[in-house]
Amino acid sequence: MANLPAEKDRRVIRECLSLEAAGFDVTVIAPRGDRSLRILPGSDRTRLRPYPIVVYGSGVLSFALEFLWSFAWITIRLLGEILRGRAQAVQVCNPPDIYFPLALLVRALGRPWVFDHHDLSPEVYISRGGEPNPLVSRLLVLFEKLTLRTATAVFATNESFRENAVRRGVVPAKVTVVRNGPALAEIAASADPRPDGPLTVVYLGVFGPQDNVEGAVLAAAELVVRRGRTGWRMILAGDGETAAGLRELAADRGLTDVVEFTGWLTGPEVDALLRRADVALQPDLPTRMNQLSTMAKTVEYLGRGVPVVAADLIETHATVGGAGLYVPNGTPAEFAEAIGTLLDDPALRARMREIGRQRFRDFLSWEHQAAEYVAVWQRLLRPGPAPRVPGQRRPSSPARVDAP
């Protein structure tokens, strides 16, 4: 993977821990984050093979340089793992969708190459603002198609991603839906009663141009007009390329007393924050990318039973169901009105809290996803009538999975 250090990607962490519990050895090739880390946090033996990042993309040319840099380093690291006999199979995550030449090499060696489809790269490009270059858009579609079709198997994060893969020419039997979301064990056993203090509105996630966190700040400005500055606050947890601009926006609008920025949080810190939250905000706008995407933050919200305010998006509605209030266009005024409705109605929040928790327990938690995820690897690397499941005794000679 090329867009986050391994220790900051919760999906990758959960996948690695699930593979490790099933008896596989895992090595992760990703950008360097914490220089002190050699083993993935929380794991017993998942090795980190980081590489340096010196180029950060902000436009077409700089993104191209960043991707070429990452491709070169991932190639070097992966070839090293193959030559050492440590790569019996490979999983690749996007963005970007540029690793299909390595898929051809790995598959020529008779080893599985699995694509874990995190983002719809063509739609991400369009969503970042400005006038999209038609040539770049077509190139990204081509890269996505080649990435999907050169894979031995594909993990899709929801049914819309699965339909996209099939539309790009992937045989349906090769695509498995593995959704994002925390494990039950990551969530504290008791989430009630909530602590005393002001009602809390939370945004959790990445601060990027396509994430519309600006909409959350502007919704806070609307809430100040509607209900004053006391009795509530908004916490924006995360980081990203728009973070500095968002802090400036909050200061310019005079919101520093009601809007708090926490930066990146660890897993336990995320759990503690969401357990005391009253309303969660998903400010993503109704673009094609967002219509088809399931936001990881939203499943985190539901796991703690936090009612969600969001635009009425296809996959968001499929995930949240009755645990959310939906707005048509995602304007700050719409978000503020829906947030205010929930802040004023504790009985409604309580009903939605229970709906969210039940959807999480019965369908969305990582335990449900891990079973599907590990089953694919069992089929690819340990075919037979009695597949292993997480928690069984580890074999003496575990298979290895490398994850660039």
Image (cartoon, rainbow, N blue to C red):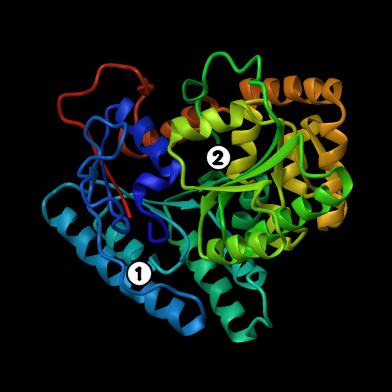
Q: Earlier in the sequence, mark 2 or mark 1?
A: 1
Return the x and y of residue 373 as percentages of the image width and height: 46, 35
Q: Residue furthest left?
A: 84
- Return the residue at label 2: 180
Name the quadrant containing residue 300: top right
Amino acid type, callout 2: Asn
In the figure, is residue 213 to the left or right of 242?
right
Estimate how packed mark 1 is, as few (under 14), some (14 to 19) or many (20 or more) residues with alpha carbons within 10 Å.
Answer: few
**In the image shown, does 123 or 326 lie closer to the viewer?**
326
Which tag is nearer the camera, tag 2 or tag 1? Answer: 2
Q: CA distance from mark 2 to mark 1?
A: 27 Å
Amino acid type, callout 1: Pro
Vertical order, 23 against 227 (above or below)? above
Numbered badge on residue 239: none
**Disc 1 secondary structure class:** helix
Dots 2 and 1: beta carbons under 8 Å?
Answer: no
- Return the residue at label 1: 101
Vertical order, 347 against 35 (above or below)? above
Estimate how packed mark 2 is, as few (under 14), some (14 to 19) or many (20 or more) residues with alpha carbons within 10 Å.
Answer: many
Q: Is residue 167 visible?
A: no
The residue drawn where x is 42% and y is 69% is 98
Return the x and y of residue 400 as percentages of the image width and height: 24, 40
Return the x and y of residue 39 as percentages of the image width and height: 23, 40
Q: Is residue 362 visible?
A: yes
Return the x and y of residue 352 as percentages of the image width and height: 78, 25
Vertical order, 392 against 52 (above or below)? above
**Disc 2 secondary structure class:** loop
Quadrant in the picture for the N terminus: bottom left
In the figure, is residue 317 to the left or right of 235?
right
